[in-house]
Image: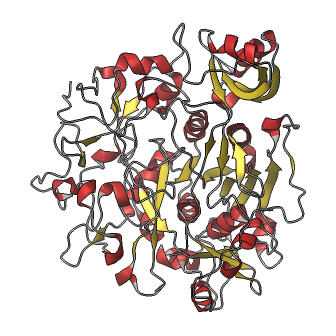
Amino acid sequence: MRTVLHRPLIVATLAGLGLLLSAPGARPGVEAPRGASEATYIVQAASATDAARVVRAAGGRVLSSLPIVDGVGARLAGPAASRLSRMPGVRLHADRRIDTANRKSDTTALVFTDGSGLRATKAFVPNYAELVNAPALHGAGVTGRGITIAFVDTGLWRAKHDDLANRVRADVSFVGSANGVAVNPKKNDSSSGDPSGHGTHVTAIAASGGRNKSGSFYGVAPAADVVVARAFDARGAGTYLDVIEALDWIVANRARLSIRVLNLSFSATPQSQYWADPINRAVMRAWASGIVVVTSAGNRGPAAMTVGVPGNVPYVITVGALTDNYTPYDGTDDRLASFSSTGPTHAGFVKPEVIAPGGHMVASMPADGYLPLLKPGSMDRNELLFTMSGTSQAAAVVSGVVALMLQANGSLTPDDVKCRLMAAARPAVTNSRRLAYSVFQQGAGLVSAVDAVSSGASGCANRGLDVAADLAGTRHFGGPANRDANGNYYVMDMNGNVWGQPAGGDGYTWSQGYTWSQGYTWSQGYTWSQGYTWSQGYTWSQGYTWSQGYTWSQGYTWSQSLPWALGGSFAGSHGSSASLNPWVENE
């Protein structure tokens, strides 16, 4: 048994964590409303069929079947919800509103402070494919052809000047299903297909087939097919139920539509252990089904422990953002974006895994979308291109890279893809060749499409984890991140030592773990080095099983622990909102 020597990230015993499973008499963290009015819930049981049965028996109305989370969406009156919340083996989750990245609650027009438009003009240079070395692959015929990327977002505007419209294999909408609207997938028949613009922007970054003036493709995987699952409205708002229905549909149709990649450019504040959150469980099912899931880390940086749902799922590829500092052809001043969310997760996992371009990203946008209304100074109405920043955009870049990897080698599993992405990434270093950012800020570093495609690395991601056992509830996992008595975050190896300690023949290591509190300032602009390898097998991507007897509780209280740390499911009252990937100014 490994002994945890310092303050753990989670103050919870194994017995306490067991309360999250379907133990007899277990109660979820949400107290059902006791009035007569109806509310929407996600009800989970041993199976979707069982969940539907108990809902109907309680007098509730089943809105949708959600096999991906062994549950249903349901409308329940207060007394019925209270009864179900006390039933053994039944979990009740009040449906939560969630938002896409860069949602803003008002319609106040925001413009560049200089008022000249020069900065906006300067920003209209789509260069993200070049920053990850994708054009070299395009020239060799590796363009993502034959691979389908699915997007759960605000929809897709099928721009006439872009051949992306010819590669849409499915376009379905789930918006409004949580309010009792018909939940069967229906054709997205809005005027533009994307009343927000966010979904179009993200999809175009990953897969646009348009070309810039130099003849290079805008998109990272310009021949990949796409599937559009709309789960957010014009203002970027949706619900847990909308998102889970979209994920369920994607997994059910993955073989028919050749879906190999799933892009999730949204991020909600965690309110439960990673394995108890319904969206996370759906995402884990998607990963287990063979789909490579790419998520945004969130836009709540630079503070520590700001990675949200579903980026806190240990299995998936979580992406942070860098900016080229408005010098696309000068890599010496590239830096981590100030808004990029930082790990570790509350379960002790190092996140993000990698970072990708996410500053002042230029891509297609419908001129009448909600986002151009908010930011008219970021819209080039002649080219119908919009400039925005966020980890949503960084995730889209990585989704495109994954499509290139899968075209080149269709036999890769999700774990293989994650391993090779990390093995090919380049960490930021200072001029003196010291690491510029901690592992909790940059993960393995900046992705490289060419190196990821050519990599032969294997077995270096998700070691020690078991997604099937996690979903079955027989084992759950904690990561190797910890916090010492001085409040510094660090990473332990599998022997309990501080991660990064030098060892003969191991090559470059992260000296002393570069604790988060020692991180360098964001504005110094370190270059991205290709000179170091990760020869330790990515011990920080491994997991420790909760069922092997580690308590992770040394009697300490942790000032950042949340109310659900001792076993609650969804803390807070019904209808609590979660702001996902808040709007950030371009940088």
Depth order, front residue of 377/171: 377
Residue 210 visible from this viewpoint: no
Depth order, front residue of 270/574: 574
Rendering quarter of residue 4: top left
Q: Position of residue 98 (x, y in %)?
A: 65, 46
**In the picture shown, does residue 362 fall above or below 94?**
below
222 left or right of 512 in image: right
Circle count: 0
Residue at 75% x, 71% y: name it. 373
Depth order, front residue of 327/458: 327
Q: Position of residue 355 (x, y in %)?
A: 44, 63
387 left or right of 496 in image: right
- Where is the N terminus found, in terms of image quarters? top left
Residue at 41% x, 24% y: name it. 566
Depth order, front residue of 203/459: 203
Rendering quarter of residue 535: bottom left
Q: How is this picture coloured?
A: secondary structure
Rendering quarter of residue 534: bottom left
Q: Position of residue 318 (x, y in %)?
A: 48, 52
Q: Position of residue 352 (x, y in %)?
A: 42, 54
443 left or right of 170 in image: left
Residue at 65% x, 54% y: name it. 100
Residue at 54% x, 8% y: name it. 25
Residue 50 visible from this viewpoint: yes
